[in-house]
Image (cartoon, grey):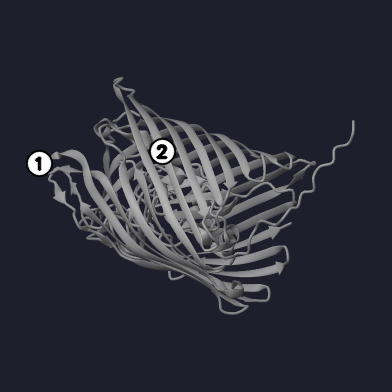
């Protein structure tokens, strides 16, 4: 047999320096076509793996809230990946994806991915993102982009330990296997005793990928991932008259046998064939599975008069979520056009088990609680099965009219078929839901380093998690939203930095309100709107000094909303857990093998609920990292978090129970590369 000569393959390093310009990145999170961020008529940015290492941000939530306009509202009950962006809050308006695929939201929970290890970049597309991801993305979509197999051999090892018994390790490796195979493996594990009672938490994950390139124009990828998270069993601290009681900072009122646990498995196979210089075909098939289990006391009411805490809401809940799908796409370049056409198909199954109606109660000392054990008079039983079948067709076109003008247009149609069965009595219903979204944008390039854009887009959000629609919500349709946005992006000469500015207005109609003539009857017809300004910047003031920062202002309100059986009017109120102002600033100074980095994160005040009766105070937290390149392969880092030991709340569990942020801590880590 004659020996086959394979074509020459040129391998280029895909990793970018920690300070690489955001506007030089490809815009895969924000568009199906190949357009750089500088040319894209939309707001998208993110953090690279080098930035996450540099700042020691090993949680996805920590990394993402360094980006413009994102604040955290995560809690154990919602999976920890709930955010606020552009005036909208929660998992039904801020989507979370991995390599462009989202798992259907079940009962308001998103927990994957928890750790940032193993990702090349984590990006955020702001504003309605239904064109890319379907329903539930009115405020923004977060997309974690995995590290890919490479034929170049590399190994990374992370070891770290710190305050409160914290220890973590990460291993990443990739390289060639023979002439046509390459691989990538990333593993991470973490544990801590926590800074309060019952604060123990742990997580572990394994991400594996294999790439086969039998020909220069054909690539096949297989991946298998496993993750287990056991977050801190902490559901907040009771407050008094809207104030945090400092003496309760390290107290936890849960039970000794409390459970918080998330297990995830993900399998994918992807094929990509470049049929010609102008035509690319790709197909991806996947299966995701998530099992979640909670058993906790979740409501605490502090009584200062007698120094006691009354506990209620004895919840035990289980989620079994499975989703299988296929994504097919075609990319075509012709006559100044880049065209993407695709069909997404998925089928999700959800079983909810619980001890509803969650009765039970007890009283413990506020300062020396005897935690006891969980007990409920209500049986833990399967309650509901549901399924959601989704079909989506999309078309997107980027037309380069001239060297200065780029016109982008796209449209997507989603068809959802929902079915629910109540296991206990056999009742149920079927519900079709449909949504159409589109985006039209125009970019003008003043020169190679600067551009301005204008775009208008639409999107749709569910009134509740799509996999958990209740009988009382069966008559509702998707909430519709629209946005108009203008922006400017500029890179400074000689790669010295960049800056961007975006201004927007979003209006979301058909949110749930109350019938004005019958306040007991929920109806669609409410309206929520926001307008805002976002600024980002990076500048090298010299060879040794670099600054990165962002600032966001949002004016969000309910234009029409009646709540509760009394029909309380919330018109003009700000939505709960939405800050008006957020900001981040990092300064980095390098001297030889040493680098000192100081970061400041500011989150403005937020209301605990839509009534705007209780206000969570604003907070500013300072972090610092001192890095020493011990040799070309090893970097040691001393990390200080919340250096001022600021006492603050990240989000409200209820008006009188808030989740507190982490106190001061110190870590020492080593990152080794081979």
Q: Name the residue under label 1.
A: 517
Residue 113 spot, x, y in % from top left: 51, 46
Q: Is residue 590 left or right of residue 571?
A: right
On residue 314, which mark appears? none
Q: Is residue 43 visible?
A: no
Instruction: Kindly identify the residue that appears in the image at 70 percent across and 48 percent down.
Output: 150
The span from disc 2 to disc 1 (Cα, nearest Å) is: 35 Å
Compared to 640, does 175 lie above or below?
above
Residue 604 spot, x, y in % from top left: 34, 65
Residue 343 spot, x, y in % from top left: 50, 35
Q: Camera-side residue: 445 or 584?
A: 445
Instruction: Kindly identify the residue that appears in the image at 33 percent across and 38 percent down.
Output: 315
Q: How crowded is mark 2: few (under 14 residues within 10 Å), some or many (20 or more)?
A: some
Q: Mark 2 points at which residue?
A: 413
Residue 50 spot, x, y in % from top left: 60, 61
Q: Which residue lies furthest to the top in this view?
A: 426
Quadrant where the image shows the N terminus: top right
Q: Is mark 2 on a helix, strand or loop?
A: strand
Q: Camera-side residue: 381 or 117?
A: 117
**Number of marks in the image?**
2
């Amino acid at each position: 047999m004659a020996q086959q000569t394979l074509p020459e393959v040129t391998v280029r390093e895909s990793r970018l320096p920690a300070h690489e310009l955001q506007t030089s990145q490809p815009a895969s999170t924000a568009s199906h076509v190949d357009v750089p961020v500088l040319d894209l008529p939309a707001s998208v940015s993110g953090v690279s793996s080098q930035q996450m290492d540099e700042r020691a941000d090993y949680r996805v939530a920590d990394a993402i809230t360094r980006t413009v306009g994102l604040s955290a509202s995560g809690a154990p009950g919602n999976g920890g990946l709930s955010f606020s962006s552009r005036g909208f809050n929660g998992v039904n308006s801020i989507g979370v994806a991995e390599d462009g695929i989202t798992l259907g939201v079940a009962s308001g929970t998103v927990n994957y991915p928890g750790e940032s290890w193993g990702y090349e970049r984590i990006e955020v597309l702001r504003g309605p993102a239904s064109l890319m991801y379907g329903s539930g993305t009115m405020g923004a979509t977060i997309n974690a982009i995995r590290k890919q197999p490479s034929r170049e051999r590399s190994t990374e090892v992370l070891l770290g330990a710190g305050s409160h018994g914290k220890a973590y390790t990460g291993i990443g490796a990739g390289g060639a296997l023979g002439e046509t195979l390459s691989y990538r493996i990333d593993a991470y594990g973490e544990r801590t005793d926590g800074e309060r009672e019952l604060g123990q938490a742990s997580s572990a994950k394994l991400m594996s990928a294999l790439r086969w390139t039998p020909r220069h124009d054909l690539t096949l990828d297989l991946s298998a991932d496993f993750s287990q998270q056991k977050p801190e069993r902490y559901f907040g601290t009771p407050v008094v008259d809207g104030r945090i009681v400092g003496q309760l900072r390290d107290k936890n009122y849960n039970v000794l046998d409390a459970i918080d646990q998330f297990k995830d498995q993900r399998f994918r196979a992807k094929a990509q064939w470049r049929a010609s210089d102008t035509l690319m075909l790709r197909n991806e098939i996947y299966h995701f599975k998530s099992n979640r289990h909670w058993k906790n006391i979740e409501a605490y009411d502090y009584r200062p008069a007698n120094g006691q805490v009354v506990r209620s809401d004895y919840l035990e809940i289980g989620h079994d979520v499975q989703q299988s799908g296929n994504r097919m796409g075609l990319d075509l370049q012709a006559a100044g056009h880049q065209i993407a056409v695709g069909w997404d198909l998925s089928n999700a199954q959800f079983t909810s088990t619980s001890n509803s109606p969650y009765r039970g109660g007890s009283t413990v000392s506020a300062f020396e609680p005897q935690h006891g054990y969980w007990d409920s008079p209500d049986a833990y039983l399967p309650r509901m099965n549901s399924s959601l079948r989704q079909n989506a067709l999309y078309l997107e076109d980027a037309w380069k009219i001239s060297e200065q003008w780029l016109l982008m247009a796209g449209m997507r149609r989603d068809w959802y078929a929902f079915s629910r069965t109540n296991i206990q009595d056999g009742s149920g219903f079927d519900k079709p839901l449909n949504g159409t979204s589109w985006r039209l944008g125009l970019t003008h390039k003043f020169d190679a380093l600067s551009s301005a854009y204008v775009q208008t887009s639409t999107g749709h959000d569910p009134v509740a998690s799509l996999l958990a629609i209740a009988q009382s919500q069966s008559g509702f349709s998707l909430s519709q939203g629209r946005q108009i946005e203008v922006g400017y992006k500029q890179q400074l000469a000689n790669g010295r930095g960049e800056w961007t500015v975006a201004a927007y207005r979003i209006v979301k109609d058909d949110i749930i309100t109350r019938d004005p003539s019958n306040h007991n009857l929920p109806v669609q017809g409410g309206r929520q709107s926001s307008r805002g300004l976002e600024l980002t910047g990076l500048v090298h003031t010299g060879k040794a000094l670099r600054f990165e920062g962002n600032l966001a202002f949002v004016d969000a309100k309910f234009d029409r909303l009646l709540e509760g059986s009394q029909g309380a009017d919330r018109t003009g109120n700000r939505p709960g857990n939405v800050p008006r102002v957020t900001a981040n600033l990092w300064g980095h100074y390098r001297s030889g093998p040493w680098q000192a980095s100081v970061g400041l994160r500011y989150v403005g005040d937020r209301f605990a609920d839509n009534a705007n009766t209780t206000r969570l105070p604003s907070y500013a937290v300072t972090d610092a990292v001192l890095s020493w390149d011990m040799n070309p392969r090893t970097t040691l880092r001393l990390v200080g978090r919340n250096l001022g030991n600021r006492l603050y709340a990240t989000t409200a569990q209820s008006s009188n129970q808030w989740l507190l942020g982490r106190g001061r801590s110190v870590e020492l880590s080593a990152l080794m590369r081979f």
